[in-house]
Image (cartoon, helix red, strand yellow):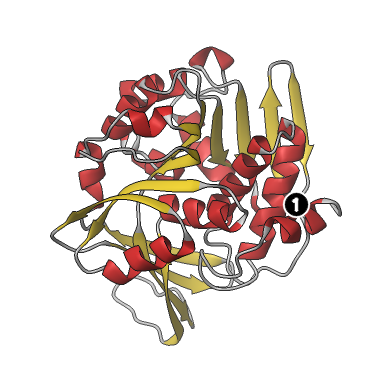
Amino acid sequence: MVKATLKTDLVVFGDTAIDHFYEVVDLPKKNHAADVLNFHSFYGGMGANTAVVANSLGIDTALVSVIGTDAEDYRNYMKNLGIKLYLKGIFGDTTKSMFFKKAENQISFFYKGVTDKLNELDFDGDIIKAAKCIYLARTYLNLQKRVARECKNRFLVYNPGYGVFKFTKIPSAFKQVLKQCNVLVLNHHELAHLSSIDFKLDFKLGPKVFLITQGDKGATVYFKGAQINVPTYKTKAVDPSGAGDAFNAGFIAAHLEGLDIYESVKLANATASFIVEQWGCQTNLPTWADVLHRYKKI
């Protein structure tokens, strides 16, 4: 069992991964090939990305995850950053993400490795009781519904990410997580898919706030009786991967600092603007002061 040892501001339940980025001449048709112009490899994973950015912003952060026996260097990297790690080592390979990119278009492939074991992870409820905020990444629904049950009186943020594209109908476990959720974060592609299977931004589902991110167009905040568009910080995007994870870290950091929802989303957009300026989801990490500087210009 993964047990708690220390109090913390934020506990992230999510995945770790190794990201491989390929810049290609073209995205070939079936049975065709294309040349690779450049190759990049970085630490990643939706959960770990959010934990690393939150830590960079000065938030006392813990990560609950599983990791393969091939990624001891990744474990040491996060430990040296000062992140509290509740990582279960599992014999096998850490998740691998492969992104083939040409300009604004990409094709992605994912090798799950040991990450599916997250759904079976046994954790100590004191991990949640010791935290001010809980963040759930992706759709490890068996784990997440167990975490959500422990989250009464805790600020719970959920971003299911691209896991929703596997839904052909809304799973009952997903609804159970939403019942305890304070904020649900989706990008506009994910919302479009969910809407196609009859999902609606309905406050009766549980969340008090829905945040819909729209890339360089910013984000839309949905409250009861209100809808507000929040612009982003304009910058030159080299690689948008990890922008959503940085957005979540920035939003949570702002909330923990006492900002209201609108101002928290502004700060989230400012945080994401740093990550898109370089390849990789954990590069170009901003400090709180860096983000505040851009936040004030939005």
Q: Can residue 171 be spotted in the picture? A: no
Across and down, in percent, residue 156 comes to 50, 29
Task: From the viewer's side, name the closer residue of 17 and 239.
Answer: 17
Label 1 crowd bin: few (<14), some (14–19), many (20+), radius 10 Å: many
Say left or right for 252 vs 40. right
Q: Can residue 161 be spotted in the picture? A: yes
Question: Which residue is at 54% across, 22% downward?
Answer: 200
Across and down, in percent, residue 231 comes to 78, 47
Circle 1: element type: loop
Across and down, in percent, residue 181 comes to 49, 24
Quadrant where the N terminus sits is: top left
Say left or right for 159 vs 64. right
Question: Which residue is at 28% across, 32% downward?
Answer: 124
The relative height of residue 42 versus residue 188 in the rendered view (above or below) is below
**Quarter assignment of residue 11:** top left
Across and down, in percent, residue 35 comes to 41, 87
The relative height of residue 153 versus residue 53 in the rendered view (above or below) is above
Say left or right for 21 vs 124. right
The relative height of residue 83 versus residue 203 in the rendered view (above or below) is below
Tell which residue pokes out farthest to the top in this image: 204
Question: Which residue is at 60% across, 65% downward?
Answer: 285
Q: What residue does disc 1 label?
A: 232
Question: Which residue is at 41% across, 62% downward?
Answer: 78
Residue type at mark 1 is Thr
Tell which residue pokes out farthest to the front in this image: 6
The relative height of residue 69 versus residue 16 in the rendered view (above or below) is below
